[in-house]
Image (spheres, helix red, strand yellow):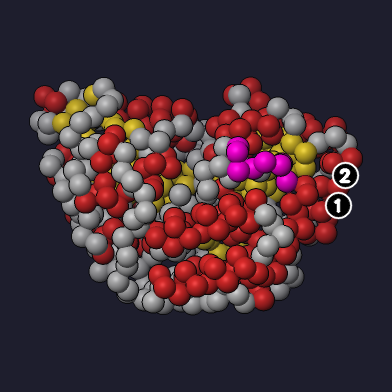
């Protein structure tokens, strides 16, 4: 998953969110290494722009703008159907969607953009968008923003703006991270959302005694554990420290970071075992099947619930650890679209992203995908499910909005250091100090 805004490290909140300026800090312009350099490039991604494995969808090429190719990481069933439905409404040309497994897409995006990329590609707001803009791999779409700007808050525009002040990204949907649970199970057992870490631990013990695995957990794909680290760090050390750590400005051997891992280790006995062999979808299904009691994940967890059970899905924000910070910070990543610098059909690409930015397109997205919220301020929220309404409220009340670990730091650091390091911790949580020393050593080389 991956992001940031042009002049501040503080991530302005979407929609009606009011964000505290106290979290702002300057974003230094720096020379960035190539992300995901250690990964090989599957042929399906490297050649996406020239050999499309998917059938054409969308309007007829007789619409005047020809065929637009769209490289997509929406490989899961629900978001894939959502994107297909949105591009079918495009009447100015044909759209060929090239869908690649989400993780494969992310790990190879840099080489993909330097090869023969599609005209348009799915990506993330903020820092991750800026990385490719600075590398000259993304097209300036400031002219598109002159057309659509009135439909988005300044916060969303900030998250779509490069360090040069130009726009390179069109926001589509966003989603908060929280602790999800089945309301019917909790009502049956008499569980109440915990407000502190001690209450969370007591609840987990009670669930264990009741025969439930307390906390669903999976990290086969590498990124889910990042969400756990994010929230524990923000709850323990505050948003500012967390963002400085992501920027390479704090040491991973700092006792504050050690405390985060100590806290996490203390919760491990309540986590679903064998997490490195489980996907997030499988963990979500265990929650849906009432085998686990709660699950820290993005709101997209709803994708894994049968439609008839979605009204039973509820959540609470991760509880307080340090009273100095309370529950003032959450992760709420923004997804959307960019145009590659090598786009062959620039006019068609810009026309497509203009449509994907429209409220009508985002209404389709939030209607088909119950785990997302629309970024367009004119989108129709009257049809939001109870879960979506609660998600929007959670985000609007947060003081600080982070984009997610692998979106708030350098892509090379996230991919080559943090994924294997967190998986090492999940596998052997007792060995903290050598792990943190290793992370710090690698960080020093990358952020040098």
Magenta region includes residue 248: no
The residue at which mark 1 appears reads as 202
Element under label 1?
helix
Instruction: Specify start and end residues of the magenta stretch as a single range.
Output: 271-278
Is 391 located above or below residue 188 in the figure? below
Q: Is residue 165 visible?
A: no
Is 258 located above or below residue 169 in the figure? below
Residue 206 — which label? 2
Residue lying at 58% horizontally and 52% vertically, measured from the top left: 423
- Image coordinates of residue 146 in percent, x first then y, are 23, 55
Residue lying at 77% horizontally and 58% vertically, measured from the top left: 266
Q: Is residue 345 visible?
A: yes
Is 360 left or right of 142, judged from the image as shown? right
Q: Quadrant of the C terminus?
A: bottom left
Task: Give the prevailing secondary structure in the magenta stretch.
Answer: loop
Is 180 left or right of 223, judged from the image as shown? right
Is 290 left or right of 390, judged from the image as shown? right
Q: Quadrant of residue 310?
A: top right
* Near-viewer residue (185 or 230): 230
Is 281 left or right of 216, judged from the image as shown? left
The answer to whether mark 2 and mark 1 are in CB contact below 8 A is yes
């Amino acid at each position: 998953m991956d992001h940031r805004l042009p002049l501040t490290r503080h991530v302005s909140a979407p929609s009606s969110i009011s964000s505290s300026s106290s979290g702002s800090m300057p974003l230094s312009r720096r020379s960035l290494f190539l992300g995901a350099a250690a990964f090989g490039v599957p042929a399906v991604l490297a050649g996406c722009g020239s050999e499309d494995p998917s059938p054409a969808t969308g309007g007829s090429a007789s619409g005047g703008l020809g065929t637009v190719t769209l490289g997509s990481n929406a490989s899961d069933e629900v978001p894939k159907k959502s994107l297909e439905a949105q591009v079918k409404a495009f009447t100015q040309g044909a759209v060929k969607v090239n869908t690649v497994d989400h993780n494969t897409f992310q790990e190879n995006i840099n080489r993909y953009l330097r090869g023969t990329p599609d005209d348009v590609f799915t990506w993330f707001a903020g820092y991750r968008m800026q990385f490719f803009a600075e590398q000259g791999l993304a097209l300036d779409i400031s002219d598109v923003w002159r057309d659509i700007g009135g439909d988005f808050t300044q916060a969303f525009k900030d998250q779509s703006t490069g360090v040069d002040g130009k726009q390179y990204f069109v926001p589509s949907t966003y989603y908060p991270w929280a602790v999800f649970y089945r309301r019917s199970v909790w009502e049956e057992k008499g569980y109440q959302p915990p407000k502190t870490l001690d209450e969370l631990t007591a609840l987990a013990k009670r669930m264990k005694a009741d025969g439930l695995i307390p906390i669903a957990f999976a990290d086969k794909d590498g990124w889910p554990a990042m969400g756990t680290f994010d929230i524990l760090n923000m709850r323990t050390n505050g948003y500012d420290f967390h963002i400085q750590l992501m920027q390479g400005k704090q040491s991973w051997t700092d006792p504050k970071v050690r405390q985060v891992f100590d806290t996490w280790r203390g919760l491990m006995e309540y986590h679903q075992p064998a997490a490195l062999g489980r996907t997030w979808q499988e963990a979500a299904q265990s929650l849906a099947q009432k085998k686990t009691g709660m699950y820290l994940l993005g709101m997209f967890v709803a994708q894994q619930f049968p439609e008839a059970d979605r009204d039973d899905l509820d959540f609470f924000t991760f509880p307080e650890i340090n009273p100095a910070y309370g529950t003032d910070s959450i992760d709420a990543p923004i997804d959307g679209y960019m145009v590659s610098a090598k786009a062959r059909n620039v006019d068609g690409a810009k026309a497509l992203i203009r449509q994907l930015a429209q409220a009508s397109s985002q209404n389709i997205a939030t209607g088909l995908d119950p785990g997302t919220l629309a970024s367009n301020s004119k989108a129709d929220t009257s049809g939001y499910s109870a879960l979506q309404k609660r998600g929007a409220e959670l985000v609007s009340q947060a003081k600080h909005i982070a984009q997610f670990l692998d979106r708030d730091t350098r892509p090379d650091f996230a991919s080559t250091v943090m994924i294997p390091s967190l998986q090492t911790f999940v596998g052997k949580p007792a060995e903290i100090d050598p792990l943190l020393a290793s992370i710090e050593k690698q960080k020093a080389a990358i952020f040098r």
